[in-house]
Image (spheres, rainbow, N blue to C red):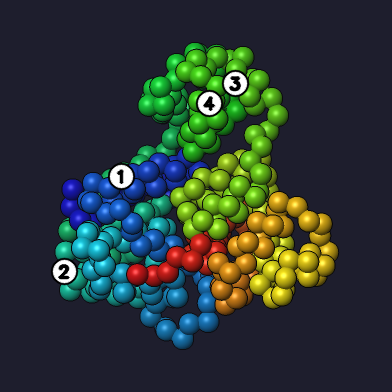
Amino acid sequence: MKPLVVISGPRDAGPGERSLMMERANLALEQLGVEDATRIDVPAKGTATDDSDDATMRGPVQEIVPALQSGSLFGGADGVLIVDAEGLLKAEAEVIVELLEVSAEPIAVFVAAGSIPAPLGSFLKKNGETVSVKRINERAAGEWLGRAARDRGLRIDRDASTILLNRFGTDVAALGQALDQLQVEGPEVTGESVRSRFKNRPDEPMWHYVDSVVAGDHAAALRRLADFLQHGHPLQLLAFLQSDVRRRSIAAAAPDYETFLEWDGGRAGWAMEKVWKQRSRIKGSDLKLALGALSRADLQMKTAPEPTHRVTMERLTVAMCRWYGGARRR
């Protein structure tokens, strides 16, 4: 596989297509020997993301410069994952082409729902490799479900398959999570077991999502996010995160546990103890960044079209993992 890869999906890719695109991207990085790629989420065109004075590249995109210029600290292959590359501005595309031309054996995977702007698009077409992800229809989703079940060692009958497809449609990410939940009950998946498991909406508490964020595990956090969004509204999660940032800020300022409880106005319990024990893991400056990002995400949710909400939450999740989990640019 060539070191420059484009994962190309449909222009209006839905959750299922986006999930497959990310799967293909991670597989490409694995085949290229990259274990921990620097991920860059390209902001949508026309959105303000920070107060950067750089007129050439927006803040989140600027991270690609040191990522392509520096090698791995541990001697292994170093790579960059650029998500939503169709949102790059022309000036940004020009700078990235210059970086790729002068970098020594760069490894970069671009995930794009639609065309990558010139001149980067034509450069990658000439020098890279393209993996296409087509729109998922019901037949393709059914075939994917069968393969995914076999990969998990599950035997799924026709009734169960029909129920899952009726419930989750072509969203293969949600189908995969449903299979993961069914897997704990044994290898046989029947229509009755599916009905029993999903007669109520799946319970994926928001604090499980926050646990993944605190661990800095953006892959797990994104999976938790996708599962929650199947049944919950993103504004619920934003409110939960805002409350969590507030509580962690209080914990960081409180001199002792009893004062923390008093200032927070909450009752003692395992949730409060967990926050208190983690109080030194997150910098005050990172909590401030998280609070600002939550405010911008809240405004985006309330003013932008609904199809953009999921992308906003995915970008917020990756950023929160960086601030909460203590991960830093290499």
Q: Earlier in the sequence, mark 3 or mark 2?
A: 2
Place residue 182 in its image quadrant: top right
Q: Earlier in the sequence, mark 3 or mark 4?
A: 4
- Where 330 sits versus 204, above or below? below
For the residues labelled 3 and 4, the Cα–Cα distance comes to 12 Å
In x, y percent, where is residue 287?
60, 71
Q: Earlier in the sequence, mark 3 or mark 1?
A: 1
Residue at 27% x, 54% y: name it.
Answer: 34
Q: Pointer 2: what residue? A: 104
Left or right: 81, with 254 as reference point: left
Place residue 185 in its image quadrant: top right
Residue at 69% x, 69% y: name it.
Answer: 251
Q: Which label number is shown at residue 184? A: 4
Judge the density around disc 1: few (<14), some (14-19), many (≥20) Cα neighbours within 10 Å.
few
Q: Pointer 1: what residue? A: 27
Judge the density around disc 2: few (<14), some (14-19), many (≥20) Cα neighbours within 10 Å.
few
Tell me if label 1 and label 4 are in contact, CB under 8 Å: no
Please name the amino acid that badge 4 sits on.
Val
Residue 240 in view, yes or no: no
Q: Pointer 3: what residue? A: 194
Left or right: 128, with 274 as reference point: left
